[in-house]
Amino acid sequence: MPPRKPTTTARTVRAGSRRAAPTRKPRRTATRKSADPDLRAPTPGERVWVLDVPFEDRSAAGATGARWQAGPGVFAYYGTALPEFLQPYESSPYSLQRWLEDDANESTDDEGVLRTRSMTPRETQLESVRRQLAAIESGVPYFAQMDSTGLGKTLSVCEAVRRMTDVATVLVVAPKGALPGWRRTIADSEADLDPAERKRWLLVTYQSTKKLLSVPADTDLGKRKRTQNKRTIALGDLRFDIDVVIADEAHALMNIESQQSQIVWRYQEAASAVVWMSATPGYQPLHFAYMARAVERARGVDIVGDDGALGYALTVRWAQFLEESGFAVKAGKASTGLTTWRWDPDDAAQRARDIEAVHGWLSGGAVPWSISRPSPPTPREPLGQELTAAQKRLYNAAWVDYRKEVGLPVWTTAGGRRVLQKNPSVRAATLRFRQKCSYLRIPASADQVRAWVKAGNQVFVSMFYRESVAALADDLRDGGLEVAVVDGSMSSAEQEVAIRRFQTGAAPVIVSTTTSAINLHTNELLLPEGTSSTLAPRITLIHDPRWTPIEIRQIEGRANRIDQDHNPTSSTCYYGYAEGTVEEEMVLTGVERIADLGSIVGQADLIDPEAFLAARVG
């Protein structure tokens, strides 16, 4: 792209004057030189603090003496004592900042104190540990921890890592909301170990995986941001030597072409062991490309190869493998001209065969490399809400106007189930009317929540739109209720504070856009205090329906979990929707897809669609 011509104004060019065309300079290849990815070592008598500074506080932190280090991409302060203003930004245990800080100081903050563990793995968790270690001993360095939500996957994996020999470093990639729980579990699982025997853990979010790469100096990354990202992923060096890679909520890797999936894939390829954790790893065959190496080992076939393929190349090889294996995978073309694939079984029998085949692969065969056990059945109730006459006029007026532009969503039958036609403009219309329904139903949901709280319950409300979250929270607070709010704009520390308010009973209601990695059940062991969450019954209201069974199951699992006494806790999940709107179809589609998800991971008892639909009709 040629350089942009300088803008002319009345100040630089007189009216009516003729300006000669600028001489075009030869285009030069842009190179981006990377700074040293390592922090400089502190001088004698000082140390360095690597700080976790939010973007909005960077100017203030800089004015207090913290300096941005371009190479590692962090704020750091060198001195003998950390100023009081900067103390709130101290790094968290096991964070990237703490890792860099320890490297620069050539020391750790481990006090070396041995403590008694607060959490003891139960027998079902020890079974997971034994199976994982047995797989490694048999030469299969992969393990899929696919127990249902609330069965204690985090403690199982920490216990397995504790028992691994010849392992020094562990990388955990997880959602932001899961990091506080990981820190507590890691610290407790190693509390009674000598510091010399403890592993070195690194916790990062999926969104920050790019920080796990460093770009060699003089690497040409190009000018466009998209080109820079592609070349960084392909040409960047792995910043850390990692023995074990753990992907928590591994369904985040289903899109193997995303940046975060490609970076995690590179670390998986270099590690000596890989663990995928998710109660909802995928609900159709194309979702499992991130497990291709394990399927290779289990099936004794060549899928990926050894040429370092990433992104789209992996998509192609996985889809071709599925086609050759007889799956109902069909090729098409995207607007970019690249071949795309979709899973489109012709009938229910083909659909069942494909799902059963994937389940068979995950079962492991001669060397089981996965474990999947269902939690107790989740109580579910449809909660249809009628719109008032005024609300119907508001909804239908916009619906008719938009119909003239793109038409109503068209529902077709594919593989024995209904699906929405894949038209981007119709998808946009659907999203718009989902949000409209969400707003119109807020008064009804607020009244229902107040009734539940009055009956002695604590209520978790799951919502999709942050604006809806704010509106519902304001309505409940105006009625005198304390409400905790958790959404993606908050830091993990802020989310943890809000969750603790709910778990300790300070706020009987929590409203959240987060679908995974938070605990909201009764009788939870709260660490490090060693106290317990309240015993008040929990109710879950899914105010905004979801399309995918992954999000639905994750939401349901926030309060349906195993408590500290190893007993299952129960929270009835109510599916809210506006009757006679697109939300009604969303609920129907979502619960039908849960059956596919359950069958793939061997948990077919997750839901009985017929029973749910009967309750809906009744």
Image (spheres, rainbow, N blue to C red):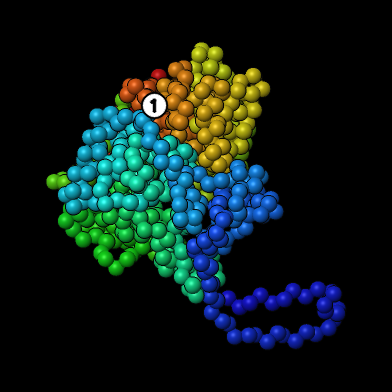
Label 1 crowd bin: few (<14), some (14–19), many (20+), radius 10 Å: many
Outermost residue to the front? 45
- Please say whether residue 586 is visible from this viewpoint: no
Instruction: State left or right for residue 482 relative to residue 528.
Output: right
Establish if 398 lies above or below 571. below
Q: Determine the image quadrant of residue 555.
A: top left
For disc 1, the marked residue is 560
Establish if 489 lies above or below 41. above
- Say which of 241 and 84 sits in front: 84
Outermost residue to the left? 366
Q: Residue at x 40, y 58 (%)?
A: 240
Q: Residue at x 82, y 79 (%)?
A: 13
**How many numbered circles does the render carry?**
1
Residue 468: x percent and y percent? 59, 34
- Say which of 462 and 498 sits in front: 498
Q: Residue at x 22, y 55 (%)?
A: 296
Residue 66: x percent and y percent? 63, 54
The quarter of the rendered structure image containing the N terminus is: bottom right
Residue 64: x percent and y percent? 68, 51
Q: Amino acid at mark 1?
A: Asn
The quarter of the rendered structure image containing the C terminus is: top left
Instruction: State left or right for residue 186 relative to residue 349.
Output: right
